[in-house]
Image: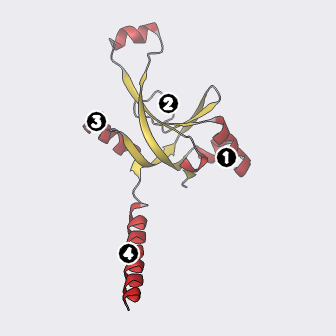
Amino acid sequence: MKYFFCIIILCSSYNLSAADTKKSSNSYITAESVFESHKANPKKVIKGTFLLPIKSITTQGLDSLLNTHSNPQDPKNITVIMPVFIKNHFQRSTQTSLESLFINHQILVKGQINWTALEPLSEQDKAESKNIKTLKPSIKLNFTDQLVHYD
């Protein structure tokens, strides 16, 4: 009889934790909430699953940079850094270019936002900035399962 109660308790606790997982799986962090959270607490590390619209793709060395704005220099742009091995994985599995796969679509990215300082592009920009550094958010992909095509 006591084994029967143990089994019932274990099953009910499993069902409760599965229900909690389903509820939390729909909570994504949007680009707007990233900036709100950073403004409220600049030292806070933002980790989670991000729902980001992709508007442009640029390159830096062998890495592809997926941008949330058409202009990568936009202060509200979030960059997803995709190493070449992840780029090759997506191109092999879908048989299409990154542009047609991601531009004007939303992606889910699991990871952590890193804030890096942007350097001014020219000497004139350096003089005008008066040593004020602009922080740019980015997420570096390390594994292929960190990125999911959402729509």
Report the front residue among 18 and 1: 1
Residue under label 4: 13
State the separation of the CA atoms marked 4 and 1.
38 Å
Under tag 2, what secondary structure? loop
Task: Residue 75: give its label.
Answer: none
Number of the front mark, 4 or 1: 4
Say which label, 1 or 2, has the lower sequence index: 2
Say which label, 3 or 4, has the lower sequence index: 4
Under tag 4, what secondary structure? helix
Please say which color scheme the image uses: secondary structure
State the separation of the CA atoms marked 4 and 2.
49 Å
Report the front residue among 34 and 112: 112
* Identity, as a three-letter code, of the amino acid under mark 1: Phe
Verify CB contact (< 8 Å) between mark 1 and mark 3: no
Q: Residues within 10 Å of mark 1 (few under 14, many from 20)?
A: some
Q: Position of residue 130 (x, y in %)?
A: 32, 11
Number of the front mark, 2 or 3: 3
83 on left or right of 43: right
Residue under label 3: 39
* Identity, as a three-letter code, of the amino acid under mark 3: Lys
Under tag 1, what secondary structure? helix
Q: Residue at left 28%, top 36%?
A: 39
Say which label, 2 or 3, has the lower sequence index: 3
Q: Residue furthest left?
A: 40
Say which label, 4 or 2, has the lower sequence index: 4
Verify CB contact (< 8 Å) between mark 4 and mark 1: no
Q: Residue at left 65%, top 29%?
A: 62
* Identity, as a three-letter code, of the amino acid under mark 4: Ser
Verify CB contact (< 8 Å) between mark 3 and mark 4: no
